[in-house]
Image (cartoon, helix red, strand yellow):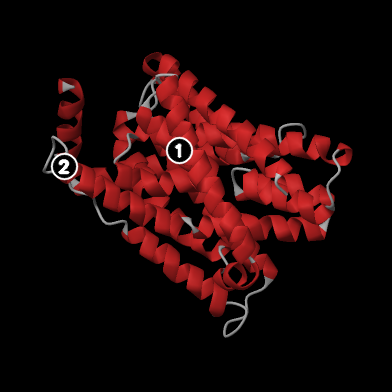
Amino acid sequence: MKTTVTKHHSIDKQPKSSLKKCCLGGIGFTFVIALAGFGLSKIPGLDRVGQLAFAIIIAVLYRQIWGFPEQLRTGIQFSAKRLLRLAIILFGLKLNIDVVLHQGLVLLVRDVGTIIFSVFLTIFLGKLLKADASLSLLLGIGTGVCGAAAIAAVSPILKAKNEDTAIGAGIIALVGTIFAISYSIIRPFIPLTALQYGIWAGVSLHEIAHVALASTPAGPDALAIALLAKLGRVFLLVPLSFILMYLTKRKGKTGSDSKTKVEFPWFLIGFIILSFFGSYVLGHTIIISASVMKGISFFTSFILTMAMIGLGLNVSLKDLRTKMLRPLLAMSITSVLLTLITYFTI
């Protein structure tokens, strides 16, 4: 601990010009790894895994082999914190509130059930397996809401460790990809209509990318209803975040640490504003082409990847080998049960 503090002080005492170079160098470092992850995700056979998972794996491996690049810490922290919040804000453009409220109210009820089931069951299984409580909670939220984006959004509220956030995001990305591919493989052999299959995918799969991956082969109707179901879960991220903020504050007041303070998640206000902007302004008052929207979506995913790299560099596998396995098992059991229950209740 003393060594780390000393290094931080030495960075703080550097001239502003040096700090700027370190900052730009650190941002560039996360950019290069994100670009490598994107490149790997385009290789045939590997394209189903996704750039986020690849980038986090590269970052974690880099840390294990060469250690944390201390001289670039300022820029890496900028990516891990500032770019992460920017990505969450821009993620709001993917949520069409009007569609959710007018066409997805029935699905919204299912979505509420999915979140409650996923969070509480993962926590319960985590306790049974004696898994890390913080990581189990993050994985439960990621499973129930919208994967890595949800984990990234609630981590500041829960004051989760950077390593837990990175590991949770990586696990969700990898496991969610496996489930999405499995859905695509078994789809021709199950007695569901395209709409039923779309609902199944949208209510039970982890991330928007996973829902799109699994439902696209079933046709446009399946994809549309699947994304609608998934958007309902994204919509519920906002009230869930405020509930968690209230519970965290209450725990701080009644627990042993009465000085616990919860930072208000201002980036969620940006998320809400852009959700309304994308729902009621874009396409109505302001017309933007599909190619521009696709570019914004890619940019959002890319800077989220850069942010997760910054977090992934904080992961020390030597300390977390036993910490990862049990929460992963709890989350996997929850995902399997969620898949089965959703399937048999459609």
Total marks placed: 2
Judge by depth and name the residue closer to the eye, 148 or 125: 125
- Three-letter amino acid code at disc 1? Phe
Is residue 191 visible to us here? Answer: yes
Sequence-first tag of 2 and 1: 1
Is residue 24 visible to us here? Answer: no
Q: Residues within 10 Å of mark 1 (few under 14, many from 20)?
A: some
Residue depicted at x 70% and y 55%: 226
Label for residue 120? 1
Q: Is residue 229 left or right of residue 183?
A: left
Residue identified by numbered label 2: 254
Residue 66 falls in image quadrant: top left
Q: Position of residue 113 (x, y in %)?
A: 55, 49
Q: Is residue 101 left or right of residue 321?
A: right
Q: Position of residue 313 (x, y in %)?
A: 40, 30
Label for residue 259? none
- Three-letter amino acid code at disc 2? Thr
